[in-house]
Image (tube, rainbow, N blue to C red):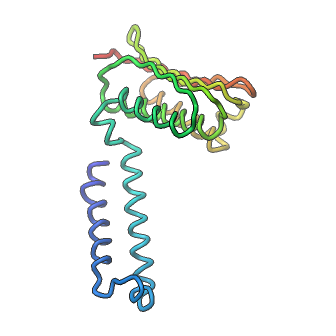
Amino acid sequence: LCLELHDSVSQTIASAYQLLQSHPAASATSLSKTHPETVRAATLIKQALGELREVINSVVPHILNELGLVETLRRELKQFQEDTGCRVQFDALSMVLPMEVAVALYRIVHEAVTNVKKHAQSDRLMVTIGERDGIITVRIKDWGVGFDPTPLDGASTGQTSGLFSMRKRAELLRGVCQVRTGPGHGTEVLVRIPFQCC
């Protein structure tokens, strides 16, 4: 689906934007005065193209295809540390995974780390990935403010809906995703997926 979107819809939108940009009267001043709707259309098309690329990249990040799960997360967590000042510990076993497993684990970790950035107010983050006895275990732990876990199943806020989606991703791989937290006690996300590493 991502490849189809990239090779068809994305290219069509890009071509439409280029056609508008090459309009004979496309100088910013003359076009905005005589055809403001054309300027608006070009702006919307450019915005749509950017949004489409974000969607494609969020489903299967290009770097995930090129570098694999561990190296992709290593780079993202390094950037997270630089952006936030939060001290990050990342320990991961190098492993070969089917793309569907790698994508699901990437999205789970990405969602958990995003929650840390938005809500945790933590100065420390630990992410570990390992495999033992045919079970992949992923652990994301912070030492932040935590939260009341009671409404998790209701998905009533952005944070709880994100946690709900992490659980569903794990369940689709016949695994489990547990969230341990409490006000003032930080948050730990623990994921277990049955899979024999290559």
- Counting labels gives 0
Residue 28 found in image quarter: bottom left
Q: Is residue 109 visible?
A: yes
Question: x and y percent of residue 156 in the render?
Answer: 67, 43
| Residue occupying image coordinates x 45% and y 90% | 33
Of residues 166 and 61, the one nearer the viewer is 61
Question: Dividing the image into 4 quarters, which one contains the C terminus?
Answer: top left
Residue 22 sits above or below residue 62 on the image: below
Residue lying at the far bottom of the rendered structure? 34
Question: x and y percent of residue 81 in the render?
Answer: 52, 33
Of residues 118 and 156, the one nearer the viewer is 118
Of residues 132 and 193, the one nearer the viewer is 132
Question: x and y percent of residue 161 in the render?
Answer: 60, 40
**From the viewer's perspective, is 42 left or right of 119?**
left
| Residue occupying image coordinates x 65% and y 38% | 119
| Residue occupying image coordinates x 29% and y 22% | 96
Residue lying at the far top of the rendered structure? 133
Question: x and y percent of residue 160 in the render?
Answer: 63, 38
Q: Is residue 1 visible?
A: no
| Residue occupying image coordinates x 43% and y 70% | 44
Residue 105 found in image quarter: top left
Residue 193 sits above or below residue 12 on the image: above
Residue 64 found in image quarter: top left
Residue lying at the far left of the rendered structure? 7
